[in-house]
Image: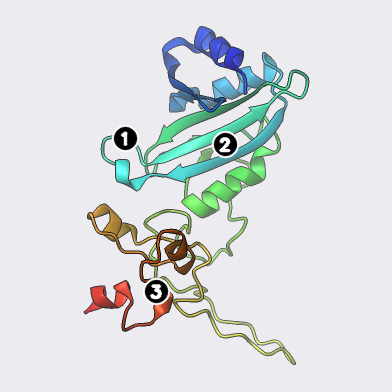
Amino acid sequence: MSKKVIKRLKSEFGDAILATSDFRGDFEARVAKKTWKKVALFLRDELQMNHIIDITAVDYPEREPELPRFEMKLIVRSMSTNDRVRIAAHLADGEKIDSLTDVWRGANWAEREIFDMFGISFNGHPDQRRILMYEEFEGHPLRKDYPIGKAQPLVPYRDVSGTEKIAPFGAEEGQPWGRIDWAARLADGDVQVSPSISQQTGGRKALSTGPETSPLAEQEE
């Protein structure tokens, strides 16, 4: 990534560049939410950042109320200079941010994924609807407060002649987003519920170890 891009952004936007970092050579500028699109246009038009690598979001519920829980991330690159930079913006729950679909067309599906997974809406998006989940899906599964035991789907299975139906996943099978019990974590607990993460973090008892030893079972009593 490029230090000179950060320098140009500071020169152009001044106090609207709230913070910068260069952890292990990855240069990032955190910008005011209202400046999100202006910075994107400057990157494209003045710094030839014509390759949008990704737009995504991260959920940090533990930092509320001191800071907004969501953080938008934009990564772009110039195909002519090979400069690369990451732009971040804090976003409170329920706040909207400007769409970048008319800056880079590739932002369209990425913003739809953010809307689908995190529930973040975009001002000016031409087709804001779910892209991975079906319309009847309730909630946004990459939010840390998405209920760990929530059963999906919430619509009846279709009857198809000659096709044997598979029953909905059970609690220990239907958690493709290996997740932590954030309610317990934020309350200073240390309850681990994902079998895969349990192995990575030293083998704390997981949901799949059975109801007798499951931390969730202890909570329900």
The amino acid pointed to by label 1 is: Leu
Of the residues under marks 3 and 1, which one precedes in the sequence?
Answer: 1
Nearer the observer, 29 or 94: 29
Find the residue positioned furthest to the bottom.
Answer: 162
- Which mark lies nearer to you, 2 or 1? 1
Residue where numbered disc 2 is placed: 124
- Which mark lies nearer to you, 3 or 2? 3
Say what secondary structure mark 3 lies in: helix
Whether residue 76 sits left or right of residue 208 in the image: it is: right
Of the residues under marks 3 and 2, which one precedes in the sequence?
Answer: 2
Nearer the observer, 166 or 203: 203
**x, y (%) of residue 210?**
38, 82
Quarter that holds the N terminus: top right
Find the residue positioned furthest to the top.
Answer: 11
**x, y (%) of residue 160?**
70, 87
Q: Is there CB contact under 8 Å for labels 2 and 1? A: no
**x, y (%) of residue 19?**
42, 21
- Which mark lies nearer to you, 3 or 1? 3
Quarter that holds the C terminus: bottom left
Residue where numbered disc 1 is placed: 67
Residue appearing at x 27%, y 60% in the figure: 184
